Amino acid sequence: MRSQAVLLLHGFLGRGDDWVDVANALETDFTVLTPDLPGHGDAVKRPDPEYTMDGAADRLAELLNSENIQTAAVIGYSMGGRLALHFALRHPDRFEKLILISASPGLRSEEERVARRSIDRQRATEIEDDLIGFLDSWYKMPLFQSLNDLERDALIAKRSQNKPAELRKSLEGMGLGAQPSHWEHLQDLRVPAWALAGGTDPKFVSIAQEMASVSQVEAVVIPNASHAVPSERPQMLAELLQGLLSANQ
């Protein structure tokens, strides 16, 4: 009997191997897939439609097909969490469980999305003009306040291996401003679902708790972690995921 499949989706600027520590902790009990998402790592020069939420979700369904996997537990961090939720709503028959980490269901109003698209276009320009400078500013945001200097420098070095033009396409096609709001669709989820957030990341703790208040999604707060949970607390996260994935198996 084949083990349960687990699909791990990385965040913006990342790549599939961001999950190596978590995946290694899980792989003895699960079949783990860690794809690069469009515009990241080796997933470059893809057809333009793949750099959208719909196209990226359809590509994930194709990945499962190629591995002869009908259903999977899908875990996504940040942008990967937004994509995981979009995937769950677009392809509900491919899901067993859904776990969102430091992720949002989107911006509720078109006005907010328009404003965010403007911000994303500016960020995309900064990425192409000076990727290292952008990364330095990015990882100094309050979201990543618990990273120490060594952790921040390591992330910058790793993220700088991405291609600026590809990151631009990802941000413009899959950024928060491009994503539709899924707040009103949370109640349509038909699988067990959790929203995880680091305890020192108040914005996403609030989002997780609000998701729980309007749907069957369960909120889980991870202590002593900020936004970058997979890189900051991989062992703690792996143990938590192990428990959630093994429940009712």
Image: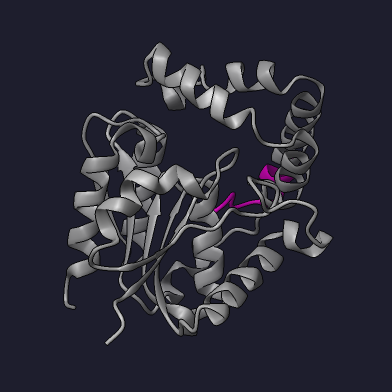
Q: Position of residue 221 (x, y in %)?
A: 25, 43
Count every numbered label the image shows and give the total: 0
From this view, report whether residue 143 is shown above or below residue 137. below
From this view, report whether residue 153 is shown above or below residue 199. above
Foreground pick, 55 / 82? 55
**In the image, residue 107 lies in the stretch drawn in magenta:** yes
- Quadrant showing the N terminus: bottom left
**In the image, residue 214 lies in the stretch drawn in magenta:** no
> Quick check: 109 left or right of 92?
right
* Range of residues picked out in magenta: 106-114
From this view, report whether residue 63 is shown above or below residue 130. below
Q: Position of residue 172 (x, y in %)?
A: 76, 45
> Quick check: 146 left or right of 222?
right
> Quick check: 121 left or right of 8?
right
Asked if one can make out residue 209 in the rendered structure from this viewpoint, the answer is no
Q: Residue at left 56%, top 23%?
A: 157
Q: Residue at left 41%, top 47%?
A: 19
Q: Residue at left 54%, top 62%?
A: 182
Asked if one can make out residue 93 in the rendered structure from this viewpoint, the answer is yes
Foreground pick, 69 / 133? 69
Q: Position of residue 184 (x, y in %)?
A: 51, 66
User: Based on the displayed image, in which of its 4 quarters is residue 125 positioned?
Assistant: top right
Considering every residue shown, the one lying at the far top of the view is 149
Foreground pick, 179 / 157? 157
